[in-house]
Amino acid sequence: MSLPDPMPLRSILPRWFFPGLRRWVAGTPFFVRWPLWLMGWGILLGGLALAGLDIVYSSLARKYDLEQLGKMPARSEIYDARGQVLGRLHGENRTLVPLSAVSPFFLKALLAREDNRFYEHGGVDYQGVLRAMVRMAKDPNVRQGASTITMQLARNSFNLTREKSISRKIMEIAITRRIEAHRTKDQILELYVNRIFFGTGIFGVERAAQGYFGKAAKDLTPDEGAMLAAIIRGPNKFSPFRHYDIAISGRDMVLDRMVTVGSLSPDEAERIKKVKTKVMPEPPPALDTWAINAVRRNLDKLLGEEEIDDGGLKIYTTLEPTLQAAAEQALEKQLSSVERVKGYQHQTPAIYQKLVDRGLAVEPEYLQGAVMLLENTTGAIRAVVGGRNIGHSGYNRAFLSKRTVGSTFKPLVYAAAVEHAGLLPDQLISDAELKPGEIRSADGGDFSPANSDNTFTGLQRAWWGLAKSRNTMAVRIGEMAGVDTVKTLSDTAGLKFIEGRSPQIYLGNLGATLESVTSAYSLFGNGGQRCRPFLIDRIENSDGELVYRSGIIAYEVVSPGTAWLTTVMMRRVMEPGGTAAAVRESGYKTQAAGKTGTTDDYHDAWFAGFTNRLTCGVWVGLDDPARIIHQGYGSRLALPVWGSVMRAAEKLGYKPAPEWPRPPGMRRVSVCTLSGSQAGAGCGRYAADMELPASHIPRQACAMHSENERGVEPERPAEPPPQPPRPGFLRRLGGLFR
C-alpha cells in the first residue's frame, strides 16, 4: 500500500513572488523540494542581511569626511635668519606632488605590485577576493591579501584599526565605495602615492625619491621605481638602507610581476635587473636641538593645535646658526672647565650617562647653564641655549627656570633712582653700615644687609657702588626711588614677578627667567626703549599664505637720558676694579656694559651685558639649587661664556658703533656731588663738572651749601681704594677666575 503524499509546504511569500519558480519547485519530489526550499530561504535571508548591512555601514561611512583624504600632515620646516633650513617638526616627512610629477615607471610598478586592475574595478576587486579565498582554501598557511589601492587609502586616511575583524573590513569596503563615487581614479592614485609610508620616517613618493635616490619623483628610473614599489609591502624588510640585497630581490619580484600583468616585456625586465641601483647614504636621525625646542615652545603660543597638527608650515625664525653654535659650545666648554676645578663635588654628564646606560638615571643632576642673545633695536632672539644636553633634559632653562637674580637686578634699581629721584653717576652715596631704623622691612623690622666683604667705606660715587656691587649703597639708592617705583619700572621692563613691598628687591632677592633679565637689560642699549623679545618672525601655511607675523613692538621704559646715565655706571663694572673687569683682561675690548650677579652661598651665577647692538645674558647653576663651587661668582662662572658669545657675534658682523649714542642736549654743568643739585659757590670741593643730558640737568641750586649759611660740614667722601698696579700676563689670565 503506498503512503499518501506529505502535506505540501505552505509559503509565507505572496503568490506573485517568482510564481514560475515556485510551481517548478512544488512539482519536484519531496527530497528535492526541501533542500531547494531551505536554500532559497537562505539566499533570500542572506540577501536581506547583506542589504541591511549595506544600509547600516553606508550610513556610518557618510560620517567620514572625504576632505580628510587630502589632509596629510606634512612636516613643518624651520628656517634661520639667513633663510636656511634649521630643522623640522610636527607632521610626517612628506612633500605633496601632483600625479603628473611622478615617474610613469613608478606608477606602472606600483599598479602591478599592489592593484593591477585598479582602473577596472569599483574600489573592491571581487575577482581578487575570490582568488585570495581559493588560494587560502588550498593552503591555509598562505595569507593572500585582497586590498585594493582605494581600500588602503581608506584604511590609512581614517586610521581604521588594523584588527582583523569582519566589522572593520565591512566599514573599509563601505568607505572605499564612497571614495570611488566621489573621486576619479587619478585623484585616488595621487592621494595614495603622497600618503604611502616608505620606511625610515619617509612618507610620500617625492620624499622617498629624494631620500633613497637623491632625485625628484618625476625622475625615477625603471629600476628605482620598482624598488620603491617593493618597499611598500615591507618598509623595514625591503629597506635599501639596511638590507640592500633584499631590496634588490624585492625590486626583481616587482619586475617579474610587471611582466605577468603585461606592463613590461621579459627582455626589458631582464635588462633592468642587471642595473645596479644606486642608493643614497642613510641620513642620520633627526635630533632635537635647543633652537627647535624653543621654536616648538613659542609655536604653541601663536597657533591653534589644529593648524600645528596639519603641518606643512614654513616657520621663519630670528636665530643665527653661527651664534647658536657658538653659544652652545661656549657654555659647554665653560661648565666642563668648572667641573675640573679641584674639590668639585657634583655629578658630571659622564657619570649621568653611565647611569643612563645602566637604566638607573631619572633626571640629570649635573651643572647646567643657559644663554640668551637678542638684538636691542628689534627684540629678535639671535641665539638661545636652555641647558647642556637636550637628550638628557629638554627643560629649557632660558625660558622656564626662575632663579634668584641677586645683584643682576641692581641696574634697574639705579635706573629707577636716576629716572625718578635725579640720581647722577658721580653723586655721593653713603656706603656706611645701615643703622637701626634707617631702612624698614615689610614687616616693620630693620633691614640692614651688609656688604659681601663685610666692610664699609663711607661716602662713595654712585657708579663706584654699582661697579663694586655694594649692598648698602644699592639699598639707599633704592630708597631714593621707593619700592613702588622700582617695582613699576621692573614690571615695565618685563620682570612681571615681584610681589609684596619688601626692600629686599633692591638686592635682587627675587626670581626671574634669563629671557626676562636679558630683555630688561636690552633697554639700556636701546636708548631706554624695550623691544618685546621674539623668536618667530613669520609663519606661512602649506599654501604660502601668511598666518602669523611678529613685527617689532617697542615702548619706552625710561628716558634716553636715564638709559645713557645708567649705562655710564654699568660700563664701570667692566673696567679695572669692577666685578666684570676680567672680560677686558681676556681680550674683549669693545664698548660694553653689564652687571654680574651671585646669590647666597654661590647657588646662582649670572652675567648680563650689552653693546649698543646686542644684549646677552648667561646663567649658571644646578637645577636643585646648591653651592656650585666656593667663590662661584658670576664673574668667574658666567662672564667667560658672555665674552665668547659676544666675540663670535662681532665676527659675524654684529659690530657696535665705536661710541655710545648720546642723548640730545648734552651739556657740561657744575653739580654738587653731595646734594645732586646745581653747585653754588659754597659747595667747594663737592662741586664737580658733569656732562649730562638736558633732561637730567638739576633745576634747583644746592640748598645744602648756601653762600649765606655755612651749615654743618658734611662727611668727607672717602677716596676709593687705590687700584693695584697692572698685573703681569699670568695674573691677568688668572683674573678670568676671580
Image (cartoon, rainbow, N blue to C red):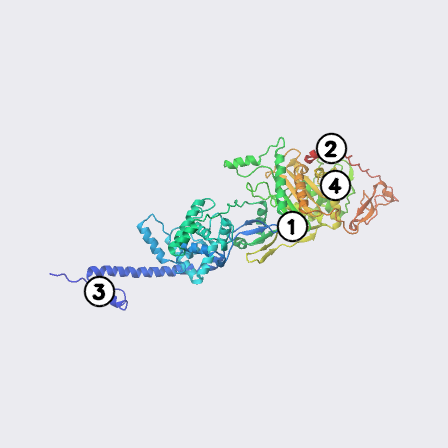
Q: Residue furthest left?
A: 1
| Circle 3: residue type | Ala
Q: Distance of mark 2 from mark 3, alpha carbons?
A: 124 Å
Residue tagged by mark 2? 728
Q: Nearer the viewer, mark 1 or mark 2?
A: 2
Residue tagged by mark 1? 380
| 405 or 310, nearer to the observer | 310
Q: Alpha-carbon neighbours of circle 1 within 10 Å: few (<14), some, or many (≥20)? A: many
Mark before the other along the chain sequence, 2 or 4: 4
Quadrant of the image containing the C terminus = top right
Residue 402: tell me if it is visible.
Answer: no
User: Is label 2 in a helix, a strand or a loop?
Assistant: loop
| Circle 4: residue type | Arg
Q: Alpha-carbon neighbours of circle 4 within 10 Å: few (<14), some, or many (≥20)? A: many
Q: Distance of mark 1 from mark 2, alpha carbons?
A: 40 Å
Q: Nearer the viewer, mark 2 or mark 3?
A: 2
Mark before the other along the chain sequence, 2 or 3: 3
Q: Distance of mark 3 from mark 4, alpha carbons?
A: 117 Å
Residue 572's disc is: 4
User: Is label 4 in a helix, a strand or a loop?
Assistant: helix
Q: Distance of mark 2 from mark 4, alpha carbons?
A: 22 Å
Q: Nearer the viewer, mark 3 or mark 1?
A: 1
Q: Alpha-carbon neighbours of circle 2 within 10 Å: few (<14), some, or many (≥20)? A: few
